[in-house]
Amino acid sequence: MIDLFTILTKGGIVLWTKSFTSVTNNPIDSLIKDVLINERGDSTNYIKNEYELKWKFSNETNLIFVVAYQKIIQLTYADELLNATQKAFLKKYSEEIQNPLDIENFEFDEEFTNLLTKIEMKDNESRKNKVQRSFKDTEAYLSTREGSQKKLNKKDESSSEDEEMPSPTFAPRSPRTGRKSPKFVKKTKTKTPKSPKSAKKGRKWDDQITAEEAEALDFSKKDDIEKSYSAEHLVDREAMGQRTKDGMYDVDEMQEESEDSDEFDEESEKQPSGKAFNFFKSITGQKVITQEDLNPVLVNMKEHLINKNVAADIAAHLCNSVSKGLIGKKASGWKGVSNLVKIEMEKALRSILTPRTSTDVLRDIFAAKKKGRPYSIVFVGVNGVGKSTNLSKVCFWLLQNKLKVLIAACDTFRSGAVEQLRVHARNLRALEENAEVDLFERGYGKDSAAIAKDAINYASLNNYDVVLIDTAGRMQDNEPLMRALAKLVTVNDPDKIIFVGEALVGNEAVDQLTKFNQALKDFSGRQNPRQIDGIILTKFDTIDDKVGAALSMTYITGQPILFVGTGQTYTDLRKMNVKSIVQCLLK
Amino acid sequence: MEMNNNLIIIIAIASIAILLIAAIVILKLTGNREKKDTFIITGICDSGKTSLYLRLRNDKVMETHTSITENEGRFPLAQEDEEKVFHVIDFPGHYKLRYKYQDFTPITKGVIFVIDSATFIKNEREVTEYLYEILANKYISENEVSILIACNKQDYLIALPKERIKTALENEINNLRSTRAAGVEEQDEDNVDDFLGYENEAFKFEHLPNQISFIECELKSGNANSGISEIKDWMVENF
């Protein structure tokens, strides 16, 4: 059923791989380039051509486990296979794995085949059972005369069957059994904070009554629970003490987190080793990081990012991807968990903000010039963000580089828009010696797509090097105007579509960019619709250190911030410094 | 008498403390002044950096994918002098992860820039931009770090010979030089790139203070004459 299973290091070296058919186009490279490097930590599967891929990180050993299969198959056991293989592989090579390059050969074929057949068999069986449910098994049957007669007998039968059924498939080495037992331990662990909690509750008067508190007051159940868990009371205490050592024992938060997410539980299941040993490790600083350790730190980090004006969704995504990268790592020596989170976050921010393509616009312009055609740039954005102002700044920079520029006034809507550009053109001519800049205008109320078309034609006839197309500002929800913009882009196919956005926006940045991109896609009527190619971030001088918009915008589009506007004059155009933005965000 | 004793003890403790602090400070200082002995392997994605790393390390040919983190190691070169331990780092070539090499340029002894000769025409600009960035790096040019440009994948039919690649790189750097010098300044800029070569003259690699060599290689072909020995010779020469 699966096509390929690969175990590779984060450095890109394949340690072990097994392919069942010949896999074309190397979907793993695309997975790494498109998903893993871009910090899209939330996605769990990736579809490329005919393949669907799932993967799992093992952070403590810097390994990645990837499984690929045909996307038309609904493979239900991919996650299970990944987990089981990871466990078996790490068990077999637990010692050597720290230096994987010293090992001659990873002989893992046999184990893997065993695992796979086991899991596939189980999957088949469960499917068969589902299909072959006869009338006698249904509830309706019980209401028949025959059924009601057998009711009592059947109950006994089915319960004993349920217990016996799985045993043949569950061989002792099967992953299921391996997983089940830690899960049970885990359960006792998560429940244990309840008993210390009921004692602590009295101190927290200002807290609202939570579900847990209500549960604690529910004495009808409590007696039973206490009885059944009293035997494990010692274990509970140890687990609790271990957490206090970290200084982050926060009952309320942990309770919430551990209850509403199964995934986290699964992550911590991986370290079922003795608690006393873990306790010792926490003293010596060799503690393995779990989701519980990360949660309080990440909550703070998320808050911090939101305070820096990063859109809330994006802050959450980022924290998720950071936690995925840290779980299982060892918090060493002096560095606490929060320090590690900060380092990991810095890496993530840096790789998001670093552009993935060249930002050398000038080089592109010269390439176009060589071909003898004008290079066209369209400026789009919502109202009042500074499209015309920044267009004139870019124009000034191009004129400094001795390029011949034509400004196309395609804002045929707002009164004064054309005149504003005329003044800019006049000023720019006066500022630079021998500056060649002209305004192309057709007045108000005309179709802007046609004006842009005329402008580009005029430019190529008169040997202009660059055409800067100014468009009317529009709200992202205004459909007729968005259609007009898509038309302008489709008709003229400009070399660059630059989105001009304010640095002042917060959550709104997400909405603006996604809707602009969506409109360009939906209304273009082409097979390969254009998208926003770059961003100019304006009013950057007004925001102090709240630079979150830069992050939000690059995260959504994946496109670089080409320039930032930092003032009122023509020279106030800068390239963004990724390092200083990252520092600002983490300060 | 007792007072005197106390005083002596205090002085002893104080002097021990001072000695300890001094020792720590000295250790720190010497620790920071690291030796320049690092060889870095760079180049754009899919050019064969990790393969080269593996060949250097244990002469193995393994399947590789795009790297997310760097591969780093201190080892003697495979089938070479055991005494000479090289510090080699292979950096990911993806655009977003490239910046990592910058932290290591102050301690870099040599740069191996790997190029996929088969797809060079398609990626010409990206390759050159990366090479330009390295050449213009403050530490690389100040320390006159030697650079080896390894034209990999010569076993492909459409691979360009190194001479062609060299002239293409020179032409493209010539273009880049003008656009980079004219670019918009960066916000609170601290490191201004140096101008490469001589002004008013077309760019040639010979104009640079660094020693730049070109070799052809085919790291994954299994061919006996794969060029790996030339790379090793170059590394030993620059050790």
Image (cartoon, helix red, strand yellow):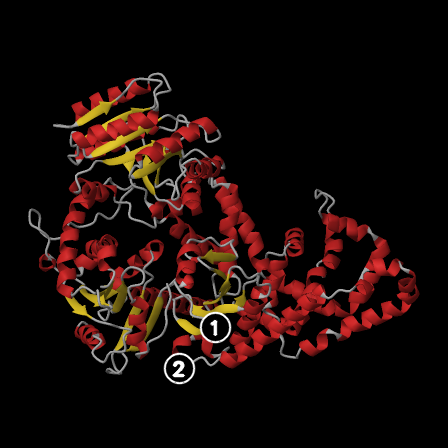
Where is residue A179? Give x, y as percent: 64, 70
A229 displayed left or right of B132: right
Relative to A536, does residue A235 appear above or below in the rendering?
A: below
Where is residue A47? Give x, y as percent: 48, 56
In depth, the one of A490 and A343 nearer the eye is A490
Q: Can residue B16 be seen in this view?
A: yes
Proximity of marks 2 and 1: CB atoms separated by less than 8 Å: no
Alpha-carbon distance for marks 2 and 1?
A: 23 Å
Relative to A225, does residue A20 appear above or below in the rendering?
A: below
Label 2, on which residue? A104
In depth, the one of A493 and A269 nearer the eye is A493
Relative to A26, does residue A415 appear above or below in the rendering?
A: above
Residue A420's image quarter?
top left
Q: Three-letter amino acid code at disc 1?
A: Phe
Where is residue A71? Give x, y as percent: 51, 59
* Label 2 secondary element: loop
A66 displayed left or right of A452: right
Tell me how many marks there are. Answer: 2
In depth, the one of A209 and A8 nearer the eye is A8
Label 1, on which residue? A20
